[in-house]
Image (spheres, rainbow, N blue to C red):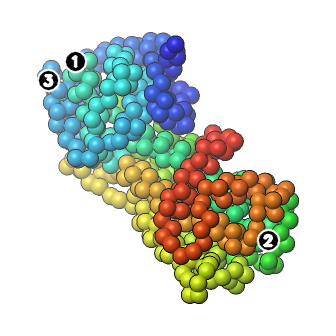
Amino acid sequence: MGMEPVELTGAGLSPLEAVALGQRRTAVRLGDVARKRMLASAAVVAAVSERRPVYGRTTGVGANRDVLTADPEHGARLLGSHSTTGTTSYPKDVVRVGLLIRVNQLAAGGSGLDPAVADAIVGLLNDDDLPDLHRGGAIGTGDLGPLAELGLALGDVIDGTSALPLLSSNAFTLAECCLAYVEASTLINVVPLVGALSHVALRGNAEVYDIRVHEARPQPGQVRVARRMRELLDGLPLPPARVQDPFGLRAFAQVLGPAVDHSDALGNSVRIDINAAAENPLVAGDTVLHNGNWHAMPIALALDSLRLSLHSVATLSTTRVANLVDPDYTGLSRFLASGAEASSGVMMIEYVAHDALAAVRSAAQPATLGTATLSRGAELHASFAPQAAALTSQLLDALREVLASELVTAVRAIRLAGLTPEALAPAPVGPWLTDALAALPPDLADRSLREDLEIARGLLTQWGDRQVEHPAESG
């Protein structure tokens, strides 16, 4: 039995739902109310363009906005010229989510496009007949190139009047934002599990998570992280090794907290844009309004802020690795070595972690510091949201490597100390340790730890999927 198609209505689509619909290849359709809305707005824009110029419909685009045209081939030429892109294809998951988002935006009814255009995109989605769309040419003022390629793939349903409104969207950048947001919030959600295992290995002082500490400075993300750490460490019977811990433990909630907040902020910005009629010109009531809603500034800034906050999360993780290889903090051997004298243990893991941290640092550079002057000065600014989105997925990959390095190191320290999950009871961190001990090889002799890091990366993904509520949708 086929599932009923999910209605796209132009409202209420969440980033997590957009990603889930794309991953499951769920059938979709244009909602009935949205269809009426699109028909009405198409009639309005046709009537208005009889009376006065409408950008891209009766005029050229960019600096050609002052050139009037009634040429029936205008739309075809626009699509042909604007389908100039770079040579790298978008991944299929980005194309699929991007098409979903574009239909949902059209359903909001501000484009003036006929519902047949939305139906044609729905057809590509439901048949899984995804066009090959390419990166390049998008700088946060509309994904012009790939949307022009989409227009060509849609064929006759796009005519001279509908080319520009189709292009007036950041749909593929928003698709990358949705995917990055879900991945970031899932990864942020497993950092406390890794941190709790490091806390155990370093015999940390849990006073730093006391509810009174965080009530005294109630930053929302920090409060949530501290609550999660209290849950994980509640009832841990190990006496703390120090009065005051190093920063990696002591400032854990204060550094991960802002990443939680910035992840939420990105989710909120993206949710607004994937349900918005952000086209220029906008059909509103019985008129057409020329506007700047194509500008992806809110998205670009949210992505930049999230990456900067995650850079500090990565940095703090490498400080815990430094503490874990130091006998002064663990009471264990140097580099957690075992066996013959002068063994190196996890010495190289620190290098792997810092290599990955360097990749995090490069990817954290703010894209919004870019500037652009285009189209003979008609377009003097850009947000560089597409670049920010691409950098975000690069950063998340490198951050996963940093956290895998910490996880392998913490679990090894716990093994060397002879601690068992039973020794941590009744603290809820125990079962997560059981999981890690079962997955990671027990051999402590000098050997390549690459496979261990690979296993740890996989474990982070599994743990992210196993958390009770999805962080992307939790309050």
The answer to whether residue 470 is above or below residue 211 is above
The type of residue carrying mark 3 is: Glu
Residue 292 in the image, given as x and y percentages of width and height: 39, 40
Is disc 2 placed on a helix, strand or loop?
A: loop
* Marks 1 and 3, the one that precedes in the sequence: 3
Q: Which residue is identified by label 2?
A: 205
Please state which of the two labelled residues, at mark 1 or mark 3, is closer to the viewer.
1
Q: Amino acid at mark 1?
A: Asp
Residue at 41% over, 25% down: 103
Q: Report the residue at 48% width, 24% height from top.
A: 26
Q: Nearer the viewer, residue 273 or 188?
A: 188
Percent from the top left, x then y, of residue 345? 56, 77
How far apart are the alpha carbons under marks 2 and 3?
72 Å
Rendered location of residue 205, percent (x, y): 79, 71
Identify which residue is drawn at 86% across, 59% down.
235
Distance, label 1 to label 3, CA atoms, is 12 Å
The picture quadrant where one finds residue 436 is bottom right
Q: Earlier in the sequence, mark 1 or mark 2?
A: 1
> Does dot 1 land on a helix, a strand or a loop?
helix
Q: Within 10 Å of the Cα at label 2, are there few (<14), some (14-19), or many (20+) other Cα atoms? A: some
Disc number placed over residue 156 in the picture, else none: 1
User: Regarding mark 3 in the picture, which secondary structure is present there?
Assistant: loop
Question: Which of marks 3 and 2 precedes in the sequence?
Answer: 3
Residue position marked by numbered label 3 in the rendering: 73
Dot 3, how many residues are within 10 Å of its Cα: few (below 14), some (14-19), or many (20+)? few
